[in-house]
Amino acid sequence: MITDIRKLNYLLNSLLELAHLNRDVNIQLSDIRLDEVIYTSIHEVKSRYQDRKFLLRINYPENENDLIVRGNPGLLTIAFNNLLENACKFSEGEVITEFLIEEKFIKIIISDSGIGIPSGQMNDIFTPFKRASNVKYKSGFGIGLSLVAKILEVHGVACSVQSAENEGTRFELLFGRGSAE
């Protein structure tokens, strides 16, 4: 019964977040260090998947300002938590997060070697309540990735997804670098 209540609570909170983002509400953005948001997400998800190995690959720049983006840390944490949790839920292996700093962008890559997404269903992964056919025995409601897509849209983040059944999934997120200065 406690498990069911937690699932229902998660569903309600996710629906509220999605509804909030779908309204024309001004989201407060500030200068944030993207690596700190990712560390927070990894820590939160790791507490739920203690047996899982998380690999973080990051080459720190000489100037810490190269890690700054405009964003809402709470919303970005929700997005990263969803992506990392899906990687844990749909794979047994390590979850890899790569952090690449380019001239005008920061690229975040989150990948796993899990069950993957069937190729004919890739276009539906960000549609609310749609779930891939190969996840019917895994818990979930089909809200997480639609919430991620909306959060990324609000932040102007480009997202691409590569996946192959029984090989894994790779999300690439492209954040514009820099502060509001």
Image: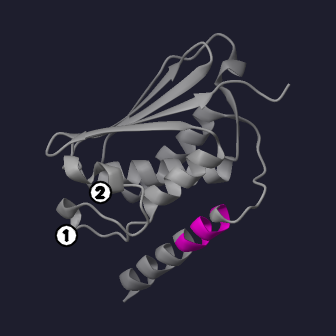
Q: Residue furthest top?
A: 62
Image location (x, y in percent) of residue 69: 69, 31
Q: How is the image coloured?
A: one colour
Q: Tell which of 19 and 79 is nearer to you.
A: 19
Q: Secondary structure at mark 2?
A: helix
Q: Does the stretch in magenta take in 144?
A: no
Say whether residue 30 is left or right of residue 54. Answer: right
Q: What amino acid type should be assigned to the residue bearing mark 2?
A: Lys
Q: Does the stretch in magenta take in 20?
A: yes
Q: Residue furthest bottom?
A: 1
Q: Tell which of 169 and 74 is nearer to you.
A: 169
Residue 118 seen: no
For the point 55% across and 15% down, the residue is 102
Image location (x, y in percent) of residue 148: 50, 53
For the magenta stretch, what is the residue range? Answer: 15-21
Q: Main secondary structure of the magenta part?
A: helix
Q: What amino acid type should be assigned to the residue bearing mark 1?
A: Tyr
Q: Which mark is residue 163?
A: none
Q: Residues within 10 Å of mark 2 (few under 14, many from 20)?
A: some
User: Does residue 144 lie above or below 34 as drawn?
Assistant: below
User: Does residue 179 lie above or below 14 as drawn?
Assistant: above
Q: Residues within 10 Å of mark 1 (few under 14, many from 20)?
A: few
Of pointers 1 and 2, the one earlier in the residue sequence: 2
- On-image quarter of the N terminus: bottom left
Q: Which residue is mark 1?
A: 137
For the point 56% across and 25% down, the residue is 106
